[in-house]
Amino acid sequence: MNPTNPLSLDGLEHVYDVLAQAIDSTLAQDQSELFLTKLSLLCAQQIGDEAQFEQLIQIALQDLKV
């Protein structure tokens, strides 16, 4: 996986902050899972590559208790 426009560390931190604020401040507790699902599907559509998105899912699952 080699993105053509990878985010810088500062860009990644900014995205994290925006995401955390959206989850913590904007959404009700029971809406966060639906929001993250919708956001994931929008990201998958933007990426446009099923295999790459599946690889990202596997990377995100690493070190998580499943």
Image (cartoon, rainbow, N blue to C red):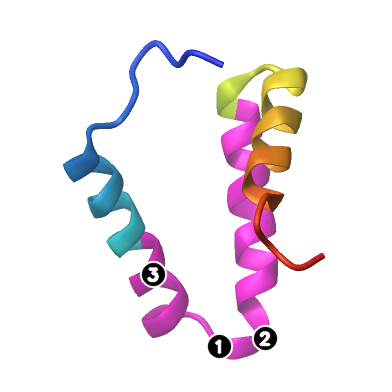
Position of 28 with respect to 57 (left or right) is left
Q: Quadrant of the N terminus?
A: top right
Q: Residue at x 40, y 62 (%)?
A: 19
Q: Is residue 14 above or below residue 25?
A: above
- The residue beneath circle 3 is 20
Q: Residue at x 75, y 68 (%)?
A: 65
Q: Are marks 1 and 2 in contact (CB under 8 Å)?
A: yes
Mark 1 vs mark 3, foreground winner is 3
- The residue beneath circle 1 is 28
Q: Residue at x 46, y 74 (%)?
A: 23
Find the distance from the CA under tag 3 to the CA under tag 2.
15 Å
Find the distance from the CA under tag 1 to the CA under tag 3.
13 Å
Q: Earlier in the sequence, mark 1 or mark 3?
A: 3
Q: Is residue 3 above or below residue 25?
A: above
Q: Earlier in the sequence, mark 3 or mark 2?
A: 3
Magenta highlight on residue 44: yes
Tell me the element at label 1. loop
Q: Which residues are magenta?
A: 19-45
Q: Amino acid at mark 3?
A: Ala
Residue 31 locus on image (x, y percent):
64, 78
Q: Residue at x 64, y 18 (%)?
A: 48
Q: Amino acid at mark 1?
A: Ala
- The residue beneath circle 2 is 30
